[in-house]
Image (cartoon, grey):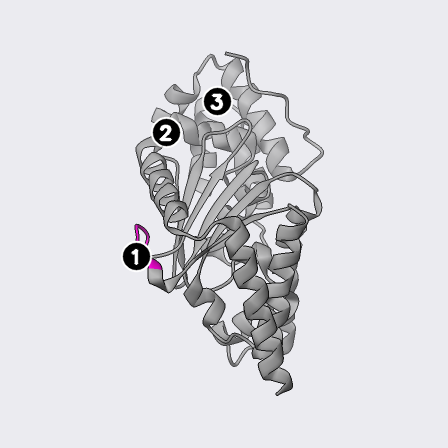
Amino acid sequence: MPGPKDLDPSSSPRALLGAELRHAREKAGLSQEKLGQLLFVSGSFVGQLEAGTRRLQTEQARVLDEVLGTGDFFRRNCRVTAVSRYPEHFAQAAEAEATATEIREYAPLLIPGLLQTPAYAEAVCRAYQPTAPQEAIDRLVSARMERARLLSDPTNPLLWVVLDEGALRRLTGGREVMAEALRHIAALVRRSRVIVQVLPFEAGAHAAMQGALKLMEFEDAPPLVYFEGIGTGRLEDDPSTVRRRRHTYDLLAACALSPRKSLAVLEAMAEDYAHEEHS
């Protein structure tokens, strides 16, 4: 099996920290699994730290400095990687998303952040924080649009989304906003930039009725699954958990409309919203 590729330390503080961690671990003669045992995490988690897809926590940094004999290097530098534009519960998922090669997401209640327009994102953020000053809402929307720049690359990452019909019919921001949002998604589909399937109400009961689901795969790190609730989020790297949730996603895709029919639904609903707005 080929060894891990060298990271570019200039790309981000986390990439630098990951590269230094790998160097210190190998110098100490420890495998990822052995170091993981000392940190009370899995070996795959250590691999994700080295690949820059997971954030190093303060207590983990303290243990690394002790075990690897690095003084206070990791404790000092993990503070830099802790700075994020995103809410705490979502920060690690957003940062992992930025390095993923494939993202598969099921959205039961709203259009996912990577597919949102600024107007739709503002309506969502305002609903979350109805009394927040406009400057705070603008910062949240700006961060969300920054995430969406992942799609400016013509091919990477692969983004495959199953959209529940409920997310398309929930009137978020008004009919004009919804028309724009659905046209935006349809345009991405027509450019062959994303794969989108609509899960219609008539599909009935399905494998993910309990909530949203995001699966991420990486070139040099194990896959992750992200679960999110109201103000909470959890990344999981346990192979059996990831495998089961990949099976869940496959079942969802099998129940959903084909990409061609889904595109027709998106465009028809966008026209309906626009017509209702003008009427």
User: Residue 210 shows which numbered tag?
Assistant: 1
Disc 2 residue crowd, few under 14, some 14–19, many 20+, Cα 10 Å: some
Q: Earlier in the sequence, mark 3 or mark 2?
A: 2
Question: Mark 1 near mark 3, Cβ–Cβ under 8 Å?
Answer: no
Direction from residue 40 to residue 94 in the image, left or right:
right
Magenta-span inclusion, residue 264: no
Q: Residue 27 location in percent, x, y?
A: 53, 14
Q: Earlier in the sequence, mark 2 or mark 1?
A: 2
From where the camera sits, is residue 143 visible? no
User: Residue 42 shows which numbered tag?
Assistant: 2
Residue at 54% in and 22% down: 22
Q: Earlier in the sequence, mark 1 or mark 3?
A: 3
Direction from residue 31 to residue 191 in the image, left or right:
right
Direction from residue 237 to residue 87 in the image, left or right:
right
* Residue beneath disc 3: 68
Residue at 47% in and 71% down: 169
Disc 1 residue crowd, few under 14, some 14–19, many 20+, Cα 10 Å: few
From this view, report whether residue 183 is shown above or below residue 37: below
Q: Residue furthest bottom?
A: 279
What residue span does the magenta drawing correspond to? 203-210
Residue type, numbered disc 1: Gln
